[in-house]
């Protein structure tokens, strides 16, 4: 079960894993992403590494071969468009240190910087203290800002920062464990997604889900040891592939609350259907047919009200029976 919340004070992100102890599998702490609105920050959340002289907005590139000016810096000087964000999330039900370790690999960080990413933000769960120590020990300093936190009650706001928005920012990417809740929310928000299965989990079922998502063109299957290739592939799909529509999205608008009854599903349905993509598509098709039939009936009723001489569908059926 994919959870991303804690029962800490509302809106606060938690960097101390001890505050989350005993709450990981609490059903009351499950976040249904589309039902939450924005929240505020407080406390130790969003620690940042990679600033120069305390400046927030500029990302510096380490001296790795001469040119210390990144494409991000050149882009920022020409336009007011924000740089990309790479948001990495491991969820809250299990640790995923191999993924956390790989996103601090110099090759991965340089790939982000070379492609106009200005921020790497990491939700690292119970491994926050370990990850924080790894970031602080980086040498040379990273080529872009790194923020990290343990848990949050509002993942949506972090996903949205990686969402492309016309004249505001190009699409970034979310690199996520293969939790069904995370996948559903990121795809709903129309954010490029790299799914990284955790091979230590039973039956390797996450790999099957990642393969299915890649086959449908909805996400990129990210493999440990090859995350740089996955980022490059995601950028290619956005630039000239099936995800090109994600370049010029309107501003994000939160869904209505409460969710209309016709659009609700139970938590069980929501979790089960994401494990069976074929069944999910079937259910969506059936719902589309129901919607089309409903519209057809409404048109018949309107035609009948405006022109009494036109037979309704029921009249025609009765004639056939007679």
Image: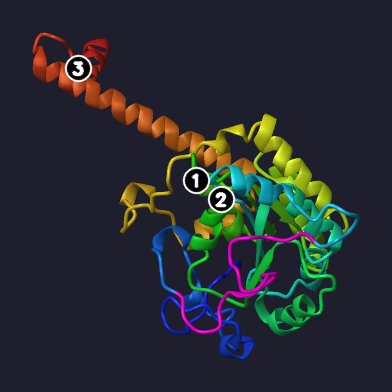
Q: Is residue 80 magenta?
A: no
Residue designated by label 1: 168
Which sits earlier in the primary sequence, circle 2 or circle 1? 2
Out of 123 and 75, give the one closest to the viewer: 75
Snapshot quadrant of residue 113: bottom right
Tell me, yes or no, whether the highlighted magenta stretch contains residue 58: yes
Q: Quadrant of the N terminus?
A: bottom right
> CA–CA distance between discs 1 and 3?
51 Å
- What residue did someone put label 3 on? 312
Question: What residue does disc 2 label?
Answer: 82
Out of 86 and 81, give the one closest to the viewer: 81
Horizontal side of 119 relative to 111 (left or right) equals left
* Residue 257 image offset from top left, x and y in percent: 31, 58
Q: Is residue 124 visible?
A: yes
Q: Are marks 1 and 3 in contact (CB under 8 Å)?
A: no
Quadrant position of residue 138: bottom right
Q: Give the x, y percent position of residue 225.
A: 88, 58
Question: Label 1: few (<14), some or many (≥20) within 10 Å?
Answer: some
Q: Which residues are magenta?
A: 41-61
Disc 1 secondary structure class: loop
- Answer whether labels 2 and 1 touch (C-beta < 8 Å): yes
Mark 3 Cα shell of 10 Å, populated few (<14), some (14-19), many (≥20): some
């Amino acid at each position: 079960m994919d959870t991303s919340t804690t029962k800490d004070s509302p809106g606060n992100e938690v960097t101390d894993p001890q505050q989350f102890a005993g709450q990981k599998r609490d059903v009351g702490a499950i976040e249904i992403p589309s039902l939450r609105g924005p929240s505020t920050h407080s406390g130790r959340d969003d620690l940042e590494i990679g600033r120069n002289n305390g400046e927030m907005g500029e990302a510096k590139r380490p001296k790795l071969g001469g040119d210390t000016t990144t494409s991000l810096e050149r882009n920022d000087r020409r336009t007011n468009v924000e740089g990309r964000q790479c948001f990495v999330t491991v969820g809250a039900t299990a640790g995923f240190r191999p993924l956390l370790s790989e996103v601090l690999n110099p090759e991965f960080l340089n790939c982000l910087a070379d492609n106009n990413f200005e921020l790497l933000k990491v939700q690292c769960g119970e491994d926050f203290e370990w990850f924080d120590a790894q970031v602080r020990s980086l040498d040379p300093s990273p080529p872009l800002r790194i923020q990290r936190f343990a848990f949050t009650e509002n993942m949506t706001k972090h996903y949205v920062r990686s969402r492309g928005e016309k004249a505001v920012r190009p699409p970034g990417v979310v690199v996520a464990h293969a939790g069904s809740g995370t996948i559903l929310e990121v795809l709903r928000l129309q954010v490029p997604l790299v799914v990284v299965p955790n091979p230590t989990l039973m039956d390797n079922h996450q790999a099957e889900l990642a393969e299915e998502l890649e086959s449908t063109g909805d996400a990129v299957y990210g493999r440990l040891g090859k995350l740089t290739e996955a980022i490059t592939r995601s950028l290619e799909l956005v630039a000239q592939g099936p995800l090109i529509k994600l370049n010029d999205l309107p501003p994000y608008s939160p869904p209505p609350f409460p969710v209309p009854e016709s659009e609700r599903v139970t938590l069980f349905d929501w979790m089960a259907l994401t494990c069976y993509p074929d069944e999910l598509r079937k259910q969506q098709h059936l719902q589309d047919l129901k919607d089309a039939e409903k519209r057809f009936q409404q048109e018949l009723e309107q035609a009948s009200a405006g022109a009494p001489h036109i037979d309704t569908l029921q009249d025609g059926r009765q004639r056939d029976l007679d």
